[in-house]
Image (spheres, rainbow, N blue to C red):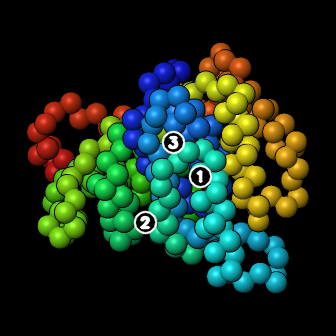
C-alpha cells in the first residue's frame, strides 16, 4: 500500500473503449499534466461501435461520434495526443498484429509508464476487450517493445528504436496497491471529461456523476488514508541488468 508521489514523465494509456480511461485514471491524468507537465498519450483500441441501445443509430455513425467525444474528453484533461486503432467493439484479440500496434506506439511515444486495465480477475468478470487490451499492453511493454528483434521492421523501416517501459499502473484492479491522492479540482475535471462522452451519458445527470465520483474516490482514498484517490495495481518492469539475453531464457 503506497501513495504515489512521483508522477510519470511520459505515459501511454492503453484503453479499450471511449470513456474507460477517464473513469479509470482521469483524475490522475489531470493532476499530473497540470502539476507536473506530464505528457499523456491515449491509445484507443476500439471504436466503441456497439455502445448504444438506440436502434436507429448505425455502427459507423456511432463510431464517428465516439471518436469526437474521445478527443473532447481527452482535451479536457490536457492529453497531448489520442491515437485510434479502431478495432470493432468486442473485436479485440491477443494477436501478434495488435501487440505490434501497441509496441509501435510505445516505441514512438517512449513512455516511462503505461496505464491499462488489470486483465486478471478472480472474483469478477469483465468485458473481453478489457482483458485483451490489458494483457496486450503489458506484453507489449514487457518485453516486445524493448528488444529490437521483435517487430524488426519498425526499427529498419519506420525509424523507431526499442524502448524500455519502467512501470505499469493497472486500473480496475481487485487488489490496488498504489494510490494517487486527488484534490477536488481533479475530480471535477474527471467528471467533466466523462460528461464529454455524451452518447454514453444520456440518462445521467452531472450532479449524480459528481456524487458517484466523490463516493468512489472517497472509498478508494480510505484505503490509502487520504480523502480522495484513484487506486492502481503497480507493476515495475525491473530487470536490474543491462544483459538482455536473460529475456530468452
Ligand atoms: Zn470498456
Tell me the quarter of the picture where residue 136 sits: bottom left
Verify CB contact (< 8 Å) between mark 2 and mark 1: no
Mark 3 burial class by Cα count in 10 Å: few <14, some 14-19, many 20+: many
Q: Residue at x 66, y 18 (%)?
A: 226
Mark 2 or 3 closer to N-term?
A: 2
Tell me the quarter of the picture where residue 152 sits: bottom left
- Left or right, 204 with reference to 15: right
Q: Residue 165: x and y, percent?
A: 32, 43
Q: CA distance from mark 2 to mark 3?
A: 18 Å
- Give the SS element for disc 2: loop
The residue where tag 2 is placed is 94
Q: CA distance from mark 2 to mark 1?
A: 26 Å
Mark 2 or 1 closer to N-term?
A: 1
Can see residue 235?
A: no
Q: Residue at x 59, y 51 (%)?
A: 75
Q: CA distance from mark 1 to mark 3?
A: 19 Å
- Left or right, 21 with reference to 169: right
Q: Residue 129: x and y, percent?
A: 56, 63
The residue where tag 1 is placed is 74
- Left or right, 36 with reference to 180: left
Between tags 1 and 3, which lies in front? 1
Amino acid at each position: 500500500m503506497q501513495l504515489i508521489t512521483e508522477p510519470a514523465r511520459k505515459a501511454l494509456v492503453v484503453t479499450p473503449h471511449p470513456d474507460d480511461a477517464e473513469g479509470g485514471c482521469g483524475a490522475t491524468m489531470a493532476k499530473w499534466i497540470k502539476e507536473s507537465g506530464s505528457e499523456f498519450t491515449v491509445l484507443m483500441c476500439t471504436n466503441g461501435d456497439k455502445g448504444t441501445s438506440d436502434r436507429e443509430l448505425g455502427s459507423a455513425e456511432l463510431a464517428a461520434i465516439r471518436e469526437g467525444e474521445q478527443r473532447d474528453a481527452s482535451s479536457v484533461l490536457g492529453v497531448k495526443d489520442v491515437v485510434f486503432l479502431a478495432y470493432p467493439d468486442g473485436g479485440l484479440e491477443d494477436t501478434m498484429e495488435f501487440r505490434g500496434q501497441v509496441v509501435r506506439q510505445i516505441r514512438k511515444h517512449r513512455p516511462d509508464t503505461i496505464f491499462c486495465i488489470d486483465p486478471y480477475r478472480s472474483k469478477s468478470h469483465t468485458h473481453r476487450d478489457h482483458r485483451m487490451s490489458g494483457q496486450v499492453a503489458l506484453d507489449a511493454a514487457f518485453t516486445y517493445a524493448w528488444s529490437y528483434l521483435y517487430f524488426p521492421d519498425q526499427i529498419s523501416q519506420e525509424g523507431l528504436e526499442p524502448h524500455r517501459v519502467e512501470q505499469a499502473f493497472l486500473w480496475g484492479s481487485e487488489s490496488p496497491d498504489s494510490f494517487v491522492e486527488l484534490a477536488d479540482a481533479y475530480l471535477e475535471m474527471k467528471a467533466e471529461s466523462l460528461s464529454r462522452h455524451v452518447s454514453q451519458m444520456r440518462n445521467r445527470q452531472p450532479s449524480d456523476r459528481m456524487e458517484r465520483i466523490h463516493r468512489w474516490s472517497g472509498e478508494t482514498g480510505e484505503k490509502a488514508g487520504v480523502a480522495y484517490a484513484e487506486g492502481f495495481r503497480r507493476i515495475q518492469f525491473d530487470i536490474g541488468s543491462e544483459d538482455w539475453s536473460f529475456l530468452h531464457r
